[in-house]
Image (spheres, grey):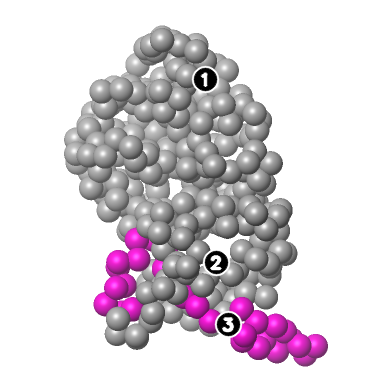
Amino acid sequence: MIQILSVYPYLQKVVRGTTDEDGQFYSQHVTYQVMGDGMQCADYIKQEDLAYQVMSMLGSDAKDFLEPYQSEVLEIAKHNNLDVRMYEDETLIQTFQEDFYTSDSQQLKLYALLAKSQIQTQDVCIISDANSVPAKDLQAVFQSAKDKGNIVVGVIKAKQVMELDAYSNVLVLAYEDVCDTFQLDAMEEDTFVALAKELHKYARILVLAMKNNRILVSVENQMYYGTCKVKDESEQVYLGAIAAGIALCYEQEGDIYQFIQECLSRNVASSLSSGIFAGSKDTVQLIKEKIVSGKLENR
């Protein structure tokens, strides 16, 4: 059994142990994991003399999570059918089973994938950077995300989507990937409109990252066109978060056009931290740093 307790904002204490016949929990191993960026509580980590090597960097620091020696929390991935309980101020929030680990060789990859996906709430699951994960395991991750979250956002390749036949609320696709998958020399808006009819089989909302800082958004075949200047074009985490916001807005019958327009403007932080999108402070800051300016037109 694994117990996860809230120690400090962005910091959780992970305790692995056993339960006796009377239901008494006995601790066997203790480690810590940082939710989000992790640097938010760096001073606290130093103050409490918490060793850096037992920190699990989730979210934007997920790349550091891939090295097994950096975090003892990886030991969690060695167990099947874990009973994971999360507490905050000694109050039980939720209980869920981690039952999708299929083999020893894939456990670390799957756990790292979930770390990269920034799964921090039961409302939104963003699955990204899944290229190295086998299809059968990625399918299990999608199913797990659907079990935990109301909205699933996939930031993966178009070919993987079609092979998996996995349905998401939102799909974020890259221009080069779509051209390669459908063997296109180039693609403009009218081409994407035609492809959207096919791709909407796998997602209610599509977000296409085009060249020259352009994006196309299709919400049930209603097209939106926008420009977004990004500091690091290799990162699509900001698009994943915006896509999640679009989906939440859709589910709550909000004004999607206004929401996207705000996200692509200087008001991105305020729009993401509003009631429409329950984003973490780390996610909001990440998006704010990457988006310089933008505009959107409804077509």
Q: Position of residue 46 (x, y in %)?
A: 30, 81
Q: Are marks 2 and 1 in contact (CB under 8 Å)?
A: no
Classify 10 Å Cα crowding around label 2: few (below 14), some (14-19), many (20 and above): many
Question: Earlier along the polypeptide chain: callout 2 or callout 1?
Answer: 2
Q: Is residue 28 magenta?
A: yes
Q: In this view of the protein, which residue sits in the foreground, 276 or 73?
A: 73
Instruction: Give the residue type that dot 2 points to.
Output: Leu
Question: Mark on residue 29?
Answer: 3
Q: Residue at x 33, y 48 (%)?
A: 272
Q: Which residues are magenta?
A: 16-45
Q: Is residue 283 magenta?
A: no
Q: Which type of secondary structure does the marked residue at label 2 adopt?
A: helix
Disc 1 target residue:
181
- Distance between the alpha carbons at the discs numbered 1 and 3: 46 Å
Disc 2 target residue:
74
- Distance between the alpha carbons at the discs numbered 2 and 1: 35 Å
